[in-house]
Amino acid sequence: MARRYTLYKKILEKHGFRQLDVYRYKTYEELRLLRLRDREVVLVKLPKRRDEMTPEEFEEVIAKHAAQ
């Protein structure tokens, strides 16, 4: 399982984020991320938990927030 979270970390770095915190709930997770280009903290609500998402689904959600 740890390898999967490493993959998610690499996806975040690819889109210019660094993970600060993860808030885990029963059906979803919220990530507190630092956007490296402007040092802004961004809260990203995932539609489900990371371990239930494929890396491609995760990257889609992160890419939407990186474009903002």
Image (spheres, helix red, strand yellow):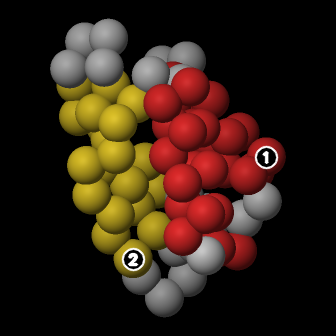
Residue 50, can we see it?
Answer: no
Residue at the extreme bottom of the image, as rendered: 26
Residue 37 percent across, percent down from the top left: 32, 11
Identify whether 44 is placed above or below 24.
above
In the rendered image, the quadrant that contains the N terminus is bottom right
Question: Badge 1: few (under 14), some or many (20 or more) residues near its Cα, within 10 Å?
Answer: few
Is 39 or 25 nearer to us in this picture?
39
Report which residue position mark 1 lands on.
Answer: 56
Q: Amino acid at mark 2?
A: Arg
Q: Residue at x 27, y 58 (%)?
A: 21
Determine the residue located farthest toward the top in the rendered image: 37
Percent x, y for residue 30? Answer: 40, 61
Q: Amino acid at mark 1?
A: Glu
The alpha-carbon separation of the residues under discs 2 and 1 comes to 20 Å
The disc label shown at residue 28, or none: none
Identify the residue under disc 2: 24
In front here: 38 or 55? 55
**Crowdedness near tag 2: few (<14), some (14–19) or many (≥20) residues, C-alpha within 10 Å:** few
Query: What residue is drawn where x is 71% and y is 39%?
Result: 60
Q: Secondary structure at mark 1?
A: helix
| Dot 2: element | strand
Total number of numbered discs in the rendering: 2
The residue shown at (56%, 25%) is 14
Q: Is residue 17 visible?
A: yes
Residue 47 vertical position relative to residue 27 in the rendered view, above or below: above
Compared across the picture, whether 52 is left or right of 15 comes to right
Instruction: List x then y, in percent, for residue 26.
Output: 48, 88
x, y (%) of residue 47?
61, 63
